[in-house]
Amino acid sequence: MPIYTAPTKDMQFVLQEVLDVTGSGIAGYEELDAEFTSAVLEEAGKLASEVLAPLNASGDREGCTLENGVVRTPKGFKDAYEQMKAGGWMGLDCDPEYGGQGMPYVLATAVGETFVSANMAFNMYQGLTHGAYSAIHAHGSDLQKTTYLPKMVEGSWTGTMNLTEPHCGTDLGLMRTKADPQDDGSYKISGQKIFISAGEHDLSDNIIHLVLAKAPGGGEGTKGISLFIVPKFLVNEDGSLGARNGVTVGNIEEKMGIHANSTCVMNYNDATGYLIGDLHKGMRAMFTMMNEARIGVGLQGYAQAEAAYQNAVAYANDRLQGRDVTGVKNPDGPADPLIVHPDIRRSLMDQKSFVEGARAFTFWGANLIDRAHRNGDKEAEGLISLMTPVIKGFQTDKGFEMAVQAQQVYGGHGYIEEHGMSQFARDARITQIYEGANGVQALDLVGRKLAADGGKHVMAFFDMVKTFIKDNEGNAALKADFLDPLKAASKDLQAAGMYFMQNGMKNPNNALAGSYDFMHMFGHVCLGLMWGRMAVAAQAALDAGAADEAFYKTKLATGRYYMARHLPATGMHLARINSGADTVMALAANEF
Ligand SMILES: Cc1cc2nc3c(=O)[nH]c(=O)nc-3n(C[C@H](O)[C@H](O)[C@H](O)COP(=O)(O)OP(=O)(O)OC[C@H]3O[C@@H](n4cnc5c(N)ncnc54)[C@H](O)[C@@H]3O)c2cc1C
């Protein structure tokens, strides 16, 4: 069975030494000292490794089942869910007014990583609930908040998001689900949604579906879409559960991974729905949920790579094959362990340097969200909006790639199911697709986010990189290995932005054909910045004579690898972008 241990030391390094959470002046962060965050992460890590991880492979094998309209989750899930509820984990960063603990989002993000690494399919039940909570919290009426949020915060009721229909996933303007207004102010919702994660299951007493539908008078396209709360069981005035609503599960999908999470066809037949937010402004309200979910999916990407990496390291130390070409390392054995071979080292360094960089990037993103929400910081809001498609798109592409690399360390034993390595790759694969496929994330980045507010946010990002390099230029130990490569990669990124400005207006295909490369370049520069910041923190700890010298030296060595072996990819991406759309669009559709 695969192993998993929460990387609490590395999380603490990012929180305390890189982000300096207690010193950052964000409301609520003063509580996040090393002692407190360590206690929370240790407890979460225990739940992750002792309760959730042991159910990962069995949940994958067993999957969910649908019988007579009832979806059953795999054995052990209900108990694990009750433990999660009892521990108050679901409301960690939720509003105390509705029973939450009011902790910063950055802490919930760190905790969430351990749960996702341990069992991604399981954690989706609560992840979607959190997203629905956030949308109701941001856009719901007072009555809606008091009716639904306390139960969702404690986990007795779960949530879903219903966008996708058989004929539309990306292009939601094509949506057909209808909302008919009723005299009492409610709506009757009719239509079919597909691929709805956690749409039906046996973990909670009620399921609160957030459903996009078209109400009369909104016009064509996405403008006519509104958002509705459609509970599985209607809720009586006293808060008790009433009649079953007109929403049923039609089927659950057979799929490549996340077998233990039910992916449902949901049929709405005159189901009672309640408008949330403004009529015909549903996309705006749903984006609250989708933006949060996109960062959560970016986290899923590297969290799967982390779990896969831990197993690959153990296997590489254990499996004996071949001899070290520079001298035998295991003279008493028939062969040396895999880890002596440079190509295995390359793979493990790829995985380790990506995961640690992505962790820092994601925690920083969560930190920006806290800054925006708790301190009303508009610059932070602009930056996280710019970087959301990067966190989602880049980290899930790389997360899948690294899960496959970890599988490769096992050779044929990674391909068969016995060791669980195939599951990490299969589960990670969906992260590249849902919450907006990665190609669409790249379009969002280049088509909307770059130019948003006159390009102010991307300029703020470049300034931040420049200031970081300038502030640390005197640090001789870091200049050649960290600062110079970051400067070069950032220049490549700026040059790509310039290419879009100069050529995108002439022919928009020039920008769109380069958007995917741009998303990856941006991801590398962000991870390069993170590695720069981590190197500064690690070097400072070593200079101050920190007790755990090995940890900081390992950190610096891992960072040097990322800067030397990954960051130069920006040059390749820039060359592709500069080649424009001509070669991409050279063939007519009928020539493929
Ligand atoms: C396991 C699973 C769970 C899911 N959970 C949920 C859920 O809980 N709720 C929910 O509402 N949905 C859910 N989805 C749906 C998911 O979000 C969609 O599948 C996804 O957004 C893509 O939509 P689509 O499948 O219709 O693909 P399409 O929109 O048909 O896109 C197909 C391909 O074309 C590309 N493409 C589309 N338009 C453009 C364009 N303009 N330019 C360039 N490329 C383009 C896309 O990137 C993609 O690669 C889930 C899907 C799966 C498989």
Image (cartoon, helix red, strand yellow):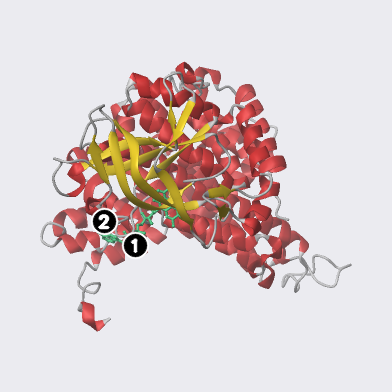
204 and 60: which is toward the camera: 204
Q: Circle 1 sits on which residue? A: 573
- Helix, strand or loop for disc 1: helix
Dot 2 crowding, Cα within 10 Å, few <14, some 14–19, many 20+: many
Q: Circle 2 sits on which residue? A: 496
Q: Amino acid at mark 2?
A: Ala
Question: 272 left or right of 308?
Answer: left
Q: Amino acid at mark 1?
A: His
The image quadrant that residue 571 belongs to is bottom left
Question: 85 left or right of 314?
Answer: left
Residue 466 visible at all: no
Q: Residue at x 52, y 44 (%)?
A: 124
Q: How many numbered badges does the structure rendering display?
A: 2
Task: Tell me if residue 84 comes above or below residue 592 in the rendering.
Answer: above
Check if mark 1's residue and mark 2's residue have beta carbons within 8 Å: yes
Residue most toward the right? 332
Query: Quick one: quadrant of the N terminus?
Result: bottom right
Q: Position of residue 432 (x, y in %)?
A: 43, 56
Q: Residue at x 59, y 47 (%)?
A: 117
Q: Residue at x 56, y 63 (%)?
A: 404
Q: Quadrant of ligand 1?
A: bottom left
